[in-house]
Amino acid sequence: MKRKKIVVLTGAGISAESGLSTFRDAGGLWEGHNVMDVASPEGWRRNRKLVLEFYNQRRRQLANAEPNEAHKALVRLEEMYDVTIVTQNVDDLHERAGSNDIIHLHGELNKSQSTLNPELIYDLNGMDINEGDKCELGSQLRPFIVWFGELVPKMDDAVKAALEAEFFIVIGTSLVVYPAAGLMQFAEPDIKKYLIDPVEPELYFDYPNLTHIRDKATAGTVSLVNELMK
């Protein structure tokens, strides 16, 4: 029997409970840095050393983090459903928890990318990318992160998944960072949709068949997965 398709969009809220800093707080800062200084092409051109060190530190932080109960609960869904996770997060916690089908919209922290040819992407053997680390074409390596102002190469894959969804779940994202925030609009109107977040989104769309579970990622996800597994 064909298994029903669940698409899950995850954001910073699911990783925060594993101790990882959220991308943006109320002050527009990330670990004390202006977001545009460390997550934009302009910031890279201004201060390459700062950007490299910033992501090197994030990588060290990630090495000490572990998947939480929300990540693990989503893996359980695969026992009964065809699950695709579309994540705005650049960590590998979904992979480490055991999820099998993951679309990283904003890149992956544990990979590097050529500054000359964006198609050249490498797994990192160590924690750091340093000045002078080069790709096979001789250009400086940069973090494999989709910065503000850059295209989101995996968006087409995410839209395709959303169009096929029979359930759509959003966990731990404010639904304000586009294009990911608009992904649920591609899901069929009559399917069940769930938003797990303790607060009301800043931009709340009147999606049909949407249930808002006002809880943190771990508790809300475990509860919903238990319901869907019945």
Image (tube, rainbow, N blue to C red):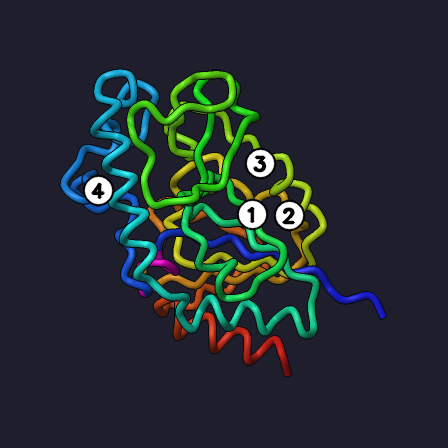
Work out whether residue 53 or residue 218 is closer to the camera in this orientation and state it: 53
In this rendering, the label closer to the viewer, 2 or 3: 3
Work out whether residue 141 or residue 109 is closer to the camera in this orientation and state it: 141
Q: CA distance from mark 3 to mark 4?
A: 24 Å
Which residue is at a point 62% across and 59% down the rendered structure image?
A: 100
User: Do the CB atoms of the residues marked 2 and 4 lie less than 8 Å apart?
Assistant: no
Q: CA distance from mark 3 to mark 1?
A: 15 Å
Residue position for label 1:
184
49 to 162, vertically: above or below: above
Q: Earlier in the sequence, mark 2 or mark 4?
A: 4
User: Do the CB atoms of the residues marked 3 and 4 lie less than 8 Å apart?
Assistant: no
Residue 16 included in the magenta stretch of the image: yes
- Percent of width and height locating residue 52: 28, 32
Which residue is at a point 43% across and 44% down the rendered structure image?
A: 125
Residue position for label 2:
162
Which residue is at a point 39% across and 57% down the rendered structure image?
A: 172
User: Do the CB atoms of the residues marked 1 and 2 lie less than 8 Å apart?
Assistant: yes
Name the side, left or right, on which 45 lies relative to 209. Answer: left
Task: Give the magenta-colored segment's residue range.
Answer: 13-17
